[in-house]
Image (tube, rainbow, N blue to C red):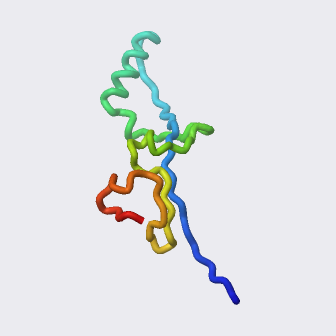
C-alpha cells in the first residue's frame, strides 16, 4: 500500500529584541540622553530601520500570552489542527 504525503505548518509566537540606531545632537552627553529619551517617547524611532538583536528570540508560553495560543498547527490548506491556548480566546476559532 502506498502512503500519501500531507503538508503541515506550525506557527509559533516568540519574543525578541530589535535594535534601532539614531543620532542626537546636543551640547553634552547629559543633554543628549534627555533628548534621546524625548525622541523615543514621541514615537520618532518607529519609522527608523531596525535590526533583530541576535540570540534574543525566545518562544513565549501560553501564560505569557494571557492564555492565547503560542503554538498552532495547520494543514497546508489552512485548517487548524492544534492550538495550545484557551480555545475560547478568539471567538472565530472553533474547538478542534
Q: Residue at x 50, y 37 (%)?
A: 18
Pick the front one: 33 or 61: 61
Residue 24 location (% of width, % of height): 42, 23
Q: Camera-side residue: 23 or 3?
A: 3
x and y, in percent, of residue 19 in the image:
51, 34
What residue is drawn where x is 54% and y is 44%? 59
Q: Residue at x 42, y 20 (%)?
A: 25
Q: Quadrant of the C terminus?
A: bottom left
Q: Position of residue 8 (x, y in %)?
A: 55, 69
Between 13 and 34, which is closer to the camera in this rendering?
Answer: 13
Quarter of the figure with the N terminus: bottom right
Number of marks in the rendered image: 0
Q: Which residue extends farthest right?
A: 1
Q: Is residue 56 left or right of residue 27?
A: right
Residue 23 sits above or below residue 80 on the image: above
Q: Which quadrant would residue 79 be assigned to in this image?
A: bottom left
- Residue at image x 51%, y 45%? 14
Amino acid at each position: 500500500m502506498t502512503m500519501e504525503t500531507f503538508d503541515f505548518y506550525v506557527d509559533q509566537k516568540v519574543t525578541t529584541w530589535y535594535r534601532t540606531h539614531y543620532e542626537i545632537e546636543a551640547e553634552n552627553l547629559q543633554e543628549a540622553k534627555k533628548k534621546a529619551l524625548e525622541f523615543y517617547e514621541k514615537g520618532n524611532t518607529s519609522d527608523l530601520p531596525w535590526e533583530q538583536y541576535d540570540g534574543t528570540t525566545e518562544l513565549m508560553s501560553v501564560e505569557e500570552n494571557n492564555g492565547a495560543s503560542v503554538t498552532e498547527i495547520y494543514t497546508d490548506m489552512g485548517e487548524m489542527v492544534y492550538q495550545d491556548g484557551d480555545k475560547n480566546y478568539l471567538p472565530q476559532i472553533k474547538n478542534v
